[in-house]
Amino acid sequence: MADHAARVSIPPRAPPNPKYVHPVTSPGLFDRDAAEAPAASASAPKGKAKKAAVVEAEPAAKAPKTAGPRRGANAEQLAERQREISVAEFFTKNRHLLGFDSPLKALLTAIKEAVDNSLDACEEAGILPEVAVEIHATENENRFRIAIEDNGPGIVKDQVGKVFGKLLYGSKFHKLSQTRGQQGIGIAAAGMYGQLTTGKPMLIRSRPGRGKAREFVLSIDTAKNRPEIHREEEVEWSHGSGTRVELELEAKYQKGLRSVDMYLKQTAIANPHLTLHYTDPGAEKVTYERVTKELPPETIEIKPHPHGVELGMLINMLKSTESRTLSGFLQEEFSRVGPKVAKDIIAAAGKGLSEKSYPTRIAREEASALHEAIQKTRISAPSTDCIAPIGEALVLAGLKKEIEADFYASITRPPAVYRGNPFQVEVGIAYGKPGGVGLELTEEGRIKKTKAQIATEDLVAGADEPVRVLRFANRVPLLHQQSACSITKAITQTNWKSYGLQHPRGALPIGPMALLVHIASVWVPFTSESKEAIAAYPEILKEVKLGLQECGRKLGTYIRKGKKLQTEFNKRSFIEKYIPHIGIALQEILDLDNTERDTTVTTLEDVLHRSRKV
Amino acid sequence: MAKKASKKAAKKAGGFEVAKTVVKRTAPLDAQDKKTLGLISNTAERVRNTILKQALPELKFPVRSLQNVEYDVKKGYFELGKLRKARALSVNTVRTFAQTLRLMSVSKEMVENDDFATKREAYYVSKNWGEAKFNDQPESDTVLDDIEALASLDGLSREHLRYRPEEHGGSLAGELTVIDRDRTTGQEIRINCARMGTGAYTIPSSVEHLEFETKANFVLAIETGGMFERLNQHNFWRQANCILISMGGVPSRAQRRFIRRLSEEKKLPVYCFVDCDPYGIGNIYRTLKVGSGNAAHINKLFCVPNARFLGVTPQDILDFKLEDATHKLLEVDIKRAKDALKNDPFFQAHKPWAKAFEQLLKMGVRAEQQALAKWGLNFVMEEYLPRKLADPDSFLP
């Protein structure tokens, strides 16, 4: 939740609409948890915890059916109720939902949350991110101490406790804008996991802006879901603004495709503006340097698009709107709705609804008609300036930076819309182990073997292996549940044979290739709360496929050229094998000396190479 | 031969230097030798000059196939047509290109040293060429045939290039005295082929220097050694006053030249007695009579235009009731027969042959010479040959 920290310390952008809760954006579990824990946040200083207010406002809007007994409940009563389910209990039972289901995954999740949040924070503050990740082995081989340090805006003293010591303290899931974090689980959950498995508190160090650095030792009061600060002091820290989080947790470190190493490498690819220092448990240090000094463009938060709204959400919005007329409601709460479109919708709905109808009085049946009418009405697509793709050039730069390959291609598709949510697809290809066919055509028309290079990581698959798929959602690498993801589906449904790759039916294509697919959206439709796979909306599938095809065509051209070069090389090598014999025969017959023979042979080789076309 | 010896001794690893020039030439180069050497060095010079002019060299050879053969009944033998094939430096030809030049180089060395190599030996010589070696003998034979065809344009033959085929057959018995000369002393040697006992005289690989004396009525050229043995053992040659020659399949050039000289100089009719199948007719007999399509360039001297086909004819199968002593024509037989009818200018020029082939194809069977044994082992000389020889005009052309 460093992202939250970041958000708190800088002026918030357009405040999220507190009147309704986007059903899609509020995964029930945590939502309720957050909603049921307003006591602590209620006491937070109003100004700084503006987002917390969103959380507080939820219960009423969220559960209209059970609203009866709850609606009148004051904060104190809610607080009492909330104690009945302890966060710790919930957390222990549901750690898999948060990505802490195995020690292996726990390590990744903890680091991932921290890094993602650091990045969000830096970007929002307009700082070029430089993040250090450390994993230290401990005496207990099942425990690791991790530290994530960023050069972000830092966190003000009063917020540190809540940001790190309180679960589901945040705001990101209520706004429609492209951020890495979407749900407020974050580093606090990691801290709690560490606390549960090792009993050790977190160590936080932060310097906001020009202030002094302070160090906090804090743990989470799991029963009350609130921070318990054990120690807090000013410290000397030779570091600009930024935050460092340290915690110890039960974990397992392992290399491989779903390792922390891989996550960091992929993060470096998708975030070419990031410099990342990594110290692994063996104290090996790696630095991923940034290739651009440009931050991703700041994205604009948008209102939901009418076509993306579900009936339940519509009803909630009607109930909580401040608009006095139906027409006003439609225009104010949604994007792309003007008087004309509002009029069309209302006319199409019928059921006695008029532009003047009072939104909060609209009954369920009428709302249903209204919902249908919205779907039927032509409404222009949502604006897409709320999306910041990485960009073709930077996808390419990111790939080139971290993956040694022979051929790269990238494509950024134009933005598209699924269910009213704008999204944008990017595809990148890194093909061929370094050296590839290992041949190049020289200016003299000869085919030379290129210098063999040293293969790096396994991001490019072996020639007879399925291609490696690098999936990203809002620049965050997705390492798990590959087969359940619509990106994988789109890849397997694309005809790679026509681009020169082997492609078993219904499986990934085979070849020395890394395939990057990035989906940027104000709301990435994950199949579950664990944010591991993207749901297969037809629009998304289609866009990904189009992107794959565009890159595939470039790849096909390259592969065909390579194959042609290879064939020609083989032919020439074959011919060259026999040229010395021609030399010997000519020498014997014509009584040439060795120099004459060699001149003849060399000339013949030249003639051969010049006369043959590639 | 020194080459061969050194080859045999050569070990794989390390190996030996290939021995050069052991047999020294005693006699000076004759005109033909000089022509041969000129042909080889001209060819090489052309290749080299093309290369030095920055162009891809190519070798041109006459096409060796029936398609490139012309047959004039009056001349009586196959002649090479004008089709040429070029061998440039491409993937498909570079290997043969190199091998051709290397074999020509070997040829040059042999002419200079008055040596020779059999086709088999030439194949083994290549084993010292590393990458360029021949993998099997048909490969080297093909290249040799090409060189030979090339040489033939200059009126040179394989013998001039110093390559020799493996000899086969060539046994002779009958009313003939061959006058040969001692290799070293040059003294005349008279060989009476009627006095070879139970053995036979063998036609040497070079026959130009031989002289003949004979009172025989005709020459009987026989396909198989077995049939020759039978006729020789029972002194059929005495009974019929003839000369028996075993060809052992397609007759070698020396045999053809030998028979040709007998036919021309001693005015002897030549009768051919082979199996009744497309191979016996289309290959053995046709080659004896008009030469081979493969080596059409040298047919002029190496053929026997007067030869006639005694048997076994398709009609003989019926006349001598051999139907139940036949075998079905194989796929390859049928193909060969059809090919002969369609492409072979010789068979196209002689109607009776076309008819005979059609008859054979219709019957769908083939009969061997030995099939006559159905009527008794000696039926062939007691009944078949006398009956046939009684009417030489009925022989196929």
Image: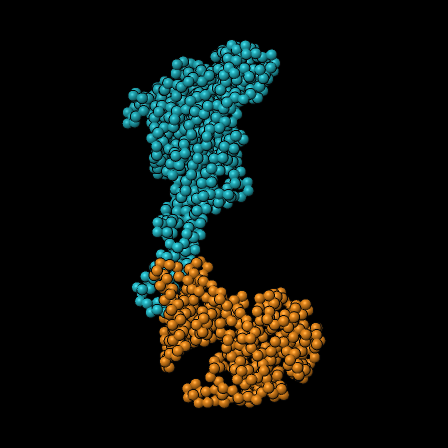
Chain colours: A cyan, B orange
Q: Position of residue B369 (x, y in %)?
A: 64, 77
Is A153 or A597 nearer to us in this picture? A597
Asked where in the image residue B77 lies, by quadrant, the reply is bottom right
The percent coordinates of residue A113 (x first, y second) are 42, 28
Left or right of B234 in this view: A289: left
Given residues A184 and A310, the one toward you in this image is: A310
User: Which residue is depicted at the point 39% across and 29% down?
Assistant: A115
Number of labelled discs? Answer: 0
Query: Which residue sits furthest front?
Result: B74
Q: Quadrant of residue B368?
A: bottom right
Using the image, determine if residue A362 lies above or below residue A142: above
The answer to whether residue B36 is above or below residue A79 is below
Quadrant, the N terminus of chain A: top left
Q: Position of residue A101 (x, y in %)?
A: 49, 31
Left or right of B79? Residue A50 is left
Q: Nearer the viewer, residue B349 or A505?
A: B349
Taking the spot 50% from the left edge, 35% from the top edge, the residue there is: A545
Q: Report the residue at 44% width, 52% height from top.
A: A567
Q: Position of residue A584 (x, y in %)?
A: 36, 66
Looking at the image, which is closer to me, A244 or A417? A417
* Depicted B57 relative to depicted B229: above or below: above
- Does the rendering let one see residue B29? yes
* Residue appearing at x 37%, y 78% in the figure: B29
Q: Does residue B196 appear in the picture of this structure?
A: no
